[in-house]
Image (tube, rainbow, N blue to C red):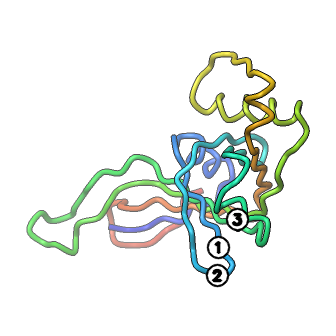
Amino acid sequence: MRTISVENLNRIKDIIKSCNICYVGIADHCGTPYVLPMNFGYKEGVIYLHSAQEGSSISMLEMNPNICITFCTDTKLVWQNEEVACSYRMKCESAICHGKVVFEEDFDEKVKALNIIMSQYSAREFSYSVPSVNNVKIWKVAIDKYSAKVFGAPGKKPSVLI
């Protein structure tokens, strides 16, 4: 099985948009990794996340806003030879994004961000109460760096997917 690097930005965006969840990696004050599964929205190079106004992750991000966000499509176990353990591999596509969290405080911008997040999961229009918008913390992450790979492709030679 081979791993193929994805270099086409539109293909990377397709991988991101095909996922239902992302994993957000941040670091605590000692540099210890902390990873959260989160719902998200993606639009024009920005990932939007939401959380409670306070908590461990917010405290960590106030000290260090650098994050890594990982996406992985549905996985499937594949193999080249059913009798050979090392020929087994998960077939999937993944994307990794790096950026800095900026907390959005403007009410109207928070509503726009919530709409972007909800558009990842539904084509419906939503409305939000004033207390709901005021009580949510919106994380806005402009992506500085993208990378992606396809895992479990048949064959022996590594190649690049364009």
* Screen quadrant of the N terminus: bottom left
Q: Position of residue 131 (x, y in %)?
A: 77, 28
Find disc 1 in the rendering and name its residue. 27
- Name which of mark 2 and mark 3 comes first in the sequence: 2
Give the number of the mark in front: 1 or 3.
Answer: 1
Q: Which of marks 1 and 3 is nearer the N terminus?
A: 1
Badge 1 density bin: few <14, some 14–19, many ≥20, Cα 10 Å:
some
Q: How far apart are marks 2 and 3 (CA)?
A: 16 Å
Report the Cα–Cα distance between label 2 and label 1. 5 Å
Q: Nearer the viewer, residue 74 or 125?
A: 125
Q: What residue would you read off at disc 3?
A: 98
What residue is rendered at 33% in x and 65% in y? 155
Q: Amino acid under label 1? A: Ala
Q: Are marks 2 and 1 in contact (CB under 8 Å)?
A: yes
Q: Nearer the viewer, mark 2 or mark 3?
A: 2
Between 66 and 106, the one lying in front of the other is 106
Question: Which residue is at 81% across, 24% downward?
Answer: 130
Circle 3 crowding by C-alpha within 10 Å: few under 14, some 14–19, many from 20:
some
Residue under pointer 2: 31
Q: In this view, does 77 lie to the left or right of 9?
A: left
Q: What residue type is labelled 3?
A: His
| Foreground of the two, 120 or 89 | 120
The answer to whether 140 appears left or right of 7 in the picture is: right
